[in-house]
Amino acid sequence: MLKRSGYADLPLHTGTVPKWLADRMMALGTEIVEALLINYGKREVLRRLSDPLWFQSLGAVLGMDWHSSGITTSVMYALKRGINAHAKDFGLVVCGGRGKHSRKTPEQIDWICNASGLNGTELIRASRLCAKVDNTALQDGFQLYQHNFILTDEGDWAVVQQGMNTVTQSARRYHWCSADIKSFVEEPHTAVTGENRGKILNLTDSNAAATRGSILLLSHENPDRMIKEIAKISGSDLMTQGELFAEKQGTGIIIENNRNLRMPAHHEVRPEDVDLKRLGGVLAAAYDQNNPDFESLLLTPGLGPRTLQSLTLVSEVIYGTPSRFKDPARFSFAHGGKDGHPFPVATKIYDESIRVLGDSIEKSKLGYKEKSECLRRLHKTALQIEANCEPLADFDATIAREKEHSHEWGGRTCMGEA
C-alpha cells in the first residue's frame, strides 16, 4: 500500500496577490511546467505536484511568501491560467480551484472527458473520493476550501487540495497522485501538508481497517441505540477543538520522515531555514569571477550575475532531485517574496528569468537544444561548486546586499515599490 511522502505545516495568511506578481507567476510557472514536459513527460509533472517539498520550493521561486498557506491557492491559480491556455499542446489541464470553483470540478471533468473520450465517471469519482477522504475519513480539524484536479490526456491525474482551521489560523495541504494509489481508503495520500496539531482521527491509516469495518456495521444499527451510547460518553471523553489543536508551533522548518515539512510562523527568512552550504554554492556560481563564463555558457548577451543566481535556482526546480527541496526557503533567493522576505521581488530579474527560460524552450521545440542544455549544465555546475565551497558565512550580509540593490532590480512588495 502507498505510504505518505510527507506533509507541511502552513501558517494561514490572508490577502491577495498583486497583478504584477500574478502575471509573472503564471508566465514562469507555465514555462517550468513546459520544461518538465519536454525533459520528463506528463507523469513527472504530476509526480512533482504531488511532492509537498517541491511544491513549496516552486512557490518560493515564483515569488510568493515562502512559508504561507497562500502558496497553494496562488500557485495553483497561476498554473491553471497558464496550463489551460496550452491544454491541447501540453496534454494537461487543471480543474477546480478555491471555494465555488472547487464545486465545479465534476462538471469540468465531465466536459473534458466528453471531448477527449476519457472515462468521466471514474475520474469524477476519484475527485470526489479525494475530497471526501480528506474532509471526512481524515478528521484533523481542517475544512476543505480548495480542490484542484490536474488531469492528463492519458487519464493520469493528481490532486492538490487544502483545508483551513479557523481556530488555530492554520492550513493543511493534501497531495494525491493516481500513479501511486492502490486504495482510496487505506494510505492513499502521496503527502499531507499542514500544521501538526496533535492527535487526529485518521481512518485512512493501514491500522484502521478494523475500525472502518466497525463503522460500516454501526451504520446499520438502530439510531436510538447509537444516540444513547453517544450520550454516555459525551462531556467526559470528548475533547473540544481548541483543546485538540493546542500544540504549540515550532520555531523553525522541521523535516520528518524524509518528506514531512512543518513551516514556521515567522515571516523573515532565518539562517536556520536555509541550507547555507547550498545557498553558498548558488551565490558562488553566480558571483565568483574565477568560475566559468556563464554569459558564454548560457549564450545570452547581457546576462549578469544576479540573473544567474535566479536561473540557478530555477534550473534546480526543473532538474533537481527530490533531496534538493528540503529547504524551500532557499528558493526565495531566486526572486524574493511579495511580503518583502527575504527581500522584495526583483521584477527586472524575474522578467529576465522568464525571457531566458522561454527562449530556451522555444529553441528546444525547433530542435536547437543548446540553451536548454546550458540550463542543465548551470545546475550541474552549481552542484560541483557547492561540493567544494564553504557554507555561506554571512547570511545577514547577503540579504542586506539584496535589499541595498533592490531598487536597481525593480524591487516590489504587495505594499509598493522598494
Image: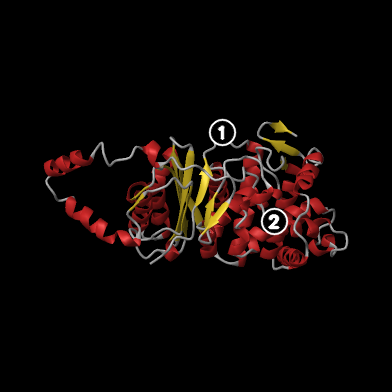
User: Is residue 177 or residue 370 the one in the foreground?
Assistant: 177
Q: Nearer the viewer, residue 4 or 51?
A: 4
Q: Earlier in the sequence, mark 1 or mark 2?
A: 1
Residue 47 at x, y percent in the picture: 51, 62
Query: Is 193 displayed left or right of 392 in the figure?
Result: left
As shown in the figure, which amino acid type bears the numbered disc 2? Answer: Leu
Whole-percent x and y of residue 218? 18, 51
**Residue extending farthest right:** 290
Q: Would you call the spot at circle 1 few (<14 residues within 10 Å), some (14-19), or many (20 or more)?
A: few
Residue 51: numbered disc: none
Residue 86 visible in rendering: no
Residue tagged by mark 1?
15
Q: Which class describes the residues within 10 Å of circle 2: few (<14), some (14-19), or many (20+)?
A: many
163 or 146: which is nearer to us? 163
Looking at the rendering, which quadrant does residue 53 occupy? bottom right
Residue extending farthest to the front is 236
Of helix, strand and loop, which one carries label 2?
Answer: helix
> Residue 277 appears in which quarter of the rendering?
bottom right
Residue 49: x and y, percent? 52, 56
In whole angstroms, how far apart are the C-alphas of marks 1 and 2?
A: 27 Å
The residue identified by callout 2 is 313
